[in-house]
Amino acid sequence: MTDETASTGGAAAGDETGRRGLRIAQDTKRSLTLLSPTLILLILALAFPILVLIVLSFWTQTGMSLTPGFTTENYEAFFQKRIYYMLLLRSIENSAMVAALTVILAYPAAYFVAFRIKRRKVLWLILITLPFWTSYLLRIFAWKVILGYNGVINSGLIQVGLIDEPLTFLLNNRQAVVVTLAHAWAAFAILPIYVSLEKIDRSLLEAAADLGENPLWSFLRVTLPLSLPGVIAAALLVFIPTVGDYVAPKLVGGNNGLMIGNIVQTQFGRGNNWPLGAAISIISMLVITGIVCSFLLLVHQAKRRLA
Amino acid sequence: MSEKALSIEDMISRARAGKLSRRQFSQMLVAAGVTLTAVPVATRGARAEEGEAFYFTWGGYDIPELLEEYNEKHGAYPDTAPYASSSEGLTKVQAGFVVDVMHPCNTNMGEWIGSGVIQPIDTSKLSHWNDMIPSLQRIGERDGEHYFAAMEWGQTSIAYRPDLVDLQGEEESWGILWDERYAGRIGVLANEGDTWWCAAIYAGVPFDEIDTDENIEKVAALLREQQPLALSYYDDVTTMEQSLASGELVAAMTWNETPTRLIKQGVPIKWAAPKEGALTWVCGASIVTDAPRVDKAHDVINSLISPRSGEYVIDAFGYGHSNVKAFERVSAERLAELGLPRDPEKLLQAGKFQTEMSIEFQSKIANMFSDIKAGF
């Protein structure tokens, strides 16, 4: 308000630029003030722990005590034993499958709400996210109930007479982990895809129809490309956190579904080797960052080629 | 303020000197104000003897039935929190969780006393101390100081479904858990404190030589052989019991409480007496070095080793108790049903008695077993 009156009542030109400079400085100051709570929180809750982790990863531990110093032996240990990179690889594969599955399943749901629902969209969005109001652990247990030996699927199939013995390949393996995680993170995929679908200018679709495009082609050539930012965001939102998940593998992964997060947990727990755990975490973070960056680069290049 | 600054300087100098316990490391983080939100319980220490004692224990033992005497004395029950294994509990305490009493087992003593996590118990404060089975009193003793008050003892063996497992006329053996006919239907405990030792029994490794490199490799090889046969490695026996009841598992390595509970539910289950011997363990209570309520901690322990708690442990869990008088409170029929003799010394001597482990051995097998569980 005061700025407005100041500029409308403007005097000499030189005075004007001075004020503008002042205003920019004020804006910067104000935005910094507005940002500072977030910034402080980010530094405290993100940057500092990562710093601690980096420092820790160069230390060593004997028995219960940590020895500060500088050694790269924890990083060497990662590559010396097959288990660590094999598990990291398995975790990345799992999460890639989870991300793909989640996006494929989330897209129709988001599409439905964005295009077919005309009224009470918020209500629909709330309904979709309703399962996510319960705890993560409960949702995993729900999957144990569904996929289990005496679970919903098995007892259903036995009742119908399709099988005599319960199927054992449903639970306690990698697929179970992928299915559980895909469901657990579905909301994180539906919402960004919904937002990008919602933003699409409907007149573009009308134009496509007017120009004689059939619905399938107008979806593939108009809707899908325009919603890609949402799809990419959804894939990343699901992929990044699931690589490090250790709860779902522990509960539904059985004896061959374990992931890198379980190993990190052991190192900080019974294994009594925090520095090695820190090193494994950092390598995982770097690898994930690398994958995400190359993925984004690929998308960027593909876009340029199309344009 | 100056005091705090001093202690931080002190820590930095200690870090320079090259030794820093994980607890001190966590304290450094607290000093920096980072873990304040992550470990809110750490501030509990400031309240000194106020409030009730905190009993940090194995899941299932955080129940009022074992703490009645404490309640009578103080008019309230201790605060409790459960853990899935004592090593898990230790990790949390070292990361800054302030508690008074914990529930370790005899194998932990070397590690726990050695690293200074627990302090001597003043046995003169325990009215039930003199009723304890003498051989159990000696566990966790160092130079006349007692760091451990034994509470319950039991066995790790095999619970199997006699209707689904065919012994083919052979004696019961640990081999059931390595039988390829039951691939994918075998349950194993996730903590090395049980599994490693049971595999050592099956491998014929004597416990006093369990920590030689050769024997470690021998046991590891057996566990690797078992990995593809196991359905899952269990942290909680409840999940395992459900799978045994449904028939998804035909046999599992577990503790006495599993058959005790499942028989009560009418599930056909047998508690094996393997020809190689079952694993016998003793667990009990210790006072944490940094316990803010040492007096009340003694009352918690006295309550745990009381005949009344003993009666409950015997009847509900099927375990033996350290208090001789506890056995007098249980009927002879019930004891016979549970396979517990009135004179427990005999049974204790008959089993393969678990010994203390060093920190190095514990960390080593924990790491190896964790790799084995993941299939490597």
Image (cartoon, grey):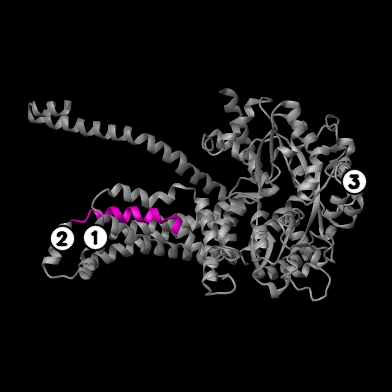
Real-space CA distance between mark 2 and mark 1, rounded to the nearest whole angstrom? 10 Å
Image-quadrant location for residue B223: bottom right
Disc 3 residue type (three-letter): Ser
Query: x, y (%) of residue B145?
Result: 85, 37
What is the magenta range?
A183-201
Query: x, y (%) of residue B301?
Result: 78, 36
- In this rendered view, identify the residue nearer to me: B300 or B43: B300
The residue identified by callout 3 is B135
Disc 2 residue type (three-letter): Leu
The residue identified by callout 2 is A204
Circle nearer the viewer, 2 or 1: 2
Real-space CA distance between mark 3 and mark 2, rounded to the nearest whole angstrom? 85 Å
Query: Can you tell which mark lies on residue A226?
Result: 1
Q: Residue at x 27, y 59 (%)?
A: A227
Whether residue A200 appears in magenta in the rendering, the answer is yes
Disc 1 residue type (three-letter): Leu
Q: Vertically, is B239 above or below B50?
A: below
Query: x, y (%) of residue B343?
Result: 92, 49
Host chain of mark 2: A
Host chain of mark 3: B
Q: Secondary structure at mark 3?
A: helix
